[in-house]
Amino acid sequence: MLLHVPQVLTPDELATVRARLAAAAWADGRVTAGHQSARVKANLQLAENGAESRELGALVLKALERSALFMSAALPAFVYPPLFNKYEAGMNFGAHVDNAIRLVPGTQRRLRTDVSATLFLSAPDEYDGGELIVNDTYGTHSAKLPAGDMILYPATSLHRVAPVTRGARVASFFWIQSLVKEDAERAMLFDLDRSIVELGAPDSPAALRLTALYHNLIRKWGAPT
C-alpha cells in the first residue's frame, strides 16, 4: 500500500526543522547504506547520533503520534529514529530495497522494516527532479509532495530517488516495524478502519460489528513485539 499522509508537520514545526537543517553540517549519506545500496547512493545525510538528529527526530515522532492516518495505515509497533538527508544538484539514489533488519543506534534492539516513510521538507518548487519512484505489483509510482507531507510504502518495494537537477531536496526518512507484518493485511485493515470512520454513528449495529471484526483481525494477524 502506497499512501500520501498530508500535513504531518504544522507550519511552525516545518519552519523549525528547516531552519535547523539549513545550518546543519552534512556528511556522505552512504554511512547508513547496506552493501548494495552504497553502490547506488549519492546524497548527504545528517549525523545519525548527533544532537540535531535526535532533537529533530523527536519532533517528527511527536508529530506522527498526532496523525490518525499514519497510525491507521502503519499500525506501528516501533518507529526507527528519523534520519535526515539532502540531495543537491547531480545527486540521486539508484534502485534498491531497504535493509530488512536495522539495529537501533545505542541499543540492542533490532527492528524489522515493514514500512518505509519519506517526510518531505523541501517544497516541490525549490528543486527539480528528486522524485521518489516506487515499483510495486501495481506498477511504478512517483511522489514529490508538499513540504510537511509524507509518503508511506512497503519496505519490500524496489524504489529510487530520481536525480536532482536544480536546488536541493531535503527530507526525513525512517522505517516502521508494524504490529501486522504483511502489507496486504495492513491494507485491508486500513480500508476497514477508514470505512468505520466514514460510516459515523459509532453505536449503530453495523459499526459495532465492523469494529469488532477490525480488532479481531488485528488479534489474528498481529504479532507481539
Image (tube, grey):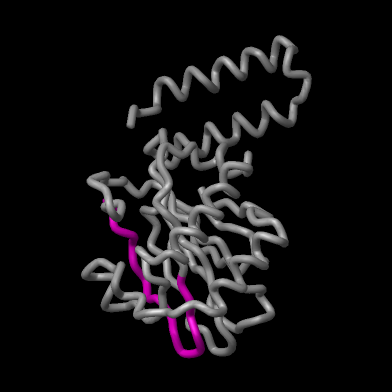
Q: Position of residue 64 (x, y in %)?
A: 57, 47
Q: Main secondary structure of the magenta part?
A: strand
Which region is colored magenta?
Answer: 85-102
- State whether residue 195 appears in this view: yes
Rendered residue at 53%/77% (across/down): 130
As drawn, the residue found furthest toward the front would be 51
In the image, is residue 93 part of the stretch drawn in magenta? Answer: yes
Q: Position of residue 35 (x, y in %)?
A: 21, 70
The residue closer to the viewer here, 140 or 27, is: 27
| Above/below status of 71 relative to 125 | above
The residue closer to the viewer here, 10 or 39, is: 10
Q: Quadrant of the C terminus?
A: top left
Rendered residue at 67%/26% (across/down): 196
Q: Give the left or right position of residue 137, taking residue 68 as reference.
A: left
Q: Position of residue 113 (x, y in %)?
A: 35, 49
Q: Give the left or right position of residue 15, taking residue 3 as reference.
A: right
In the image, is residue 117 part of the stretch drawn in magenta? Answer: no
